[in-house]
Amino acid sequence: AQTMALTPVMPSVFANYELSLAASKTRGAKQARELGALVEIGGSTDLGLVSTSAVGRNLMKGSSGRSGFTRLDTSFTSNWPGSNLTFRLGDSVTKPGLWGQVVYFGGVQLGTNFQLTPGFVTQPTAVLNGVSSSPSTVELYVNDVLRQVSQVPTGPFAIDNASALTGSGEARMVVRDLLGREVVITQPFFSSARMLAKDLSDWGAEAGLLRRAYGSSSNRYGPAFVAGAFRHGVTDHLTMEGRVQATREFAAGGLGAIAPLPAGVLGRAVFATSRDTDAGNGFHGLLGADKQWKSSAVYFQAEASTRNFRSLDTDARRPSPRLQWVANFSHSLTARGQFGFAAAGLWSWLGTKITTLSANLSFPLGERGTLSAYASKAFGNSNNISLGVTMTIPLEHNRSMSVVANVAGRQTNVYATAASGPAISGEP
């Protein structure tokens, strides 16, 4: 396969910023104003990119609370597009996977980055095959929606349109020859971006110091660690994942698998174990499944851990939850909006038991605006009811305004926001 020619790198420097001004008024008290900022500066050469970012809080004179800037990330990043590899030195996050949360750290990171090759398809692609007795026109219908019309010569042909054959469902090809005769070929298909194509590998390795109090402390780092993750497409229907983590106090490792199940369901499972110097052996398990239709989707996942299980995102004071699960359903009404329902539960080793039920609705407002609403109810250690409404209206020249109102317990908040983003190329 031919590789795209790379444009020569031009040395550059840049500065990005985002300002936020909030005003609040409480009856019987003075109006409070808070000014915040997100800033990023950096520069790049053919060797890579150097950048640093910070957050500023309470920058206005007379603001309550601690005023000043807190450093967020400082790093050097170098990409090798020919190998789909990225190297980073400095602040970063661990590579995400089936189990464990991503954590902030300072150190070195090396791993695959398929985004360096635009158009590169990592997931297994469904292939539809047929035979034409003469030059013909092929109409491809995916879940009864026409997605592609193409011309094929006499003989065997194949259609592997990755963008059209994503998700699960039924594909129907109508092969029409020069005399108008039609042959209909129907074939089920399944494809998911969470899986890797056969023989394709995705990996990452990190080492350094765990970051503590990210966003509230500039230079607070914790213990040293090493971590690695490796995903591989064993077949087009099975993707395996291995993951290891270690500090001076513990070591953990686990295996996971993602595979299509009957009825177009995508299933996933994980088993992990850890060994801690003080806590001893611990175990963690995960089961999940989801399915997508033309306009609807369902999702379910449950995780359970023993009290002694440890990973980079847990410690003795905050062990992994004993059991946590989430289930949701969403449905799109195309141009009329969408709605969804969700339920989640958490049972911790510290005695917390919470179950939450929620619903959300979103629909167009006028020509370009959006109005969305949500409601949630918690049961167990917390019995709060939350309600909220958000109205967003895009304006000209990449500006927008939004109004947010929410009620949680006895507290009611209303926010109005106006924002302006960078102008689109060619826009005044």
Image (cartoon, rainbow, N blue to C red):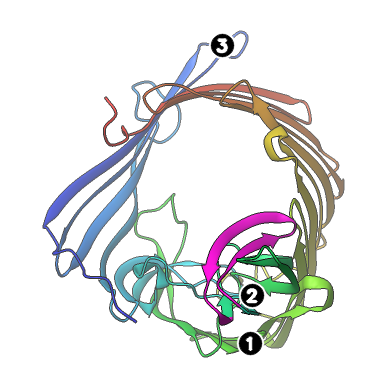
Q: Residues within 10 Å of mark 2 (few under 14, many from 20)?
A: some
Magenta segment includes 276: no
Q: Earlier in the sequence, mark 1 or mark 3?
A: 3
Up-down relation of residue 348 to residue 156 (above or below): above
Residue 412 place in picture, x, y as percent:
70, 23
Q: Quadrant of residue 409?
A: top right
* Residue 99 - label: 2
Residue 357 place in picture, x, y as percent:
84, 47
Up-down relation of residue 21 to residue 312 (above or below): above
Up-down relation of residue 254 to residue 36 (above or below): below
Question: In this view of the protein, can residue 52 be seen by the observer?
Answer: yes
Q: Residue furthest front?
A: 179
Amino acid at the residue labelled 2: Trp
Residue 85 place in picture, x, y as percent:
33, 78
Magenta segment includes 143: yes
Q: Residues within 10 Å of mark 3 (few under 14, many from 20)?
A: few
Q: Residue furthest right?
A: 380
The C terminus appears in which quarter of the rendering?
top left
* Residue 108 - label: none
Label 1–label 2 contact, CB within 8 A: yes
Q: Which residues are magenta?
A: 134-156
Q: Residues within 10 Å of mark 1 (few under 14, many from 20)?
A: many
The residue under label 3 is 29
Q: Indicate left or right for 85 with 347 as reference.
A: left
* Residue 254 - label: 1
Q: Indicate left or right for 414 with 411 as reference.
A: left
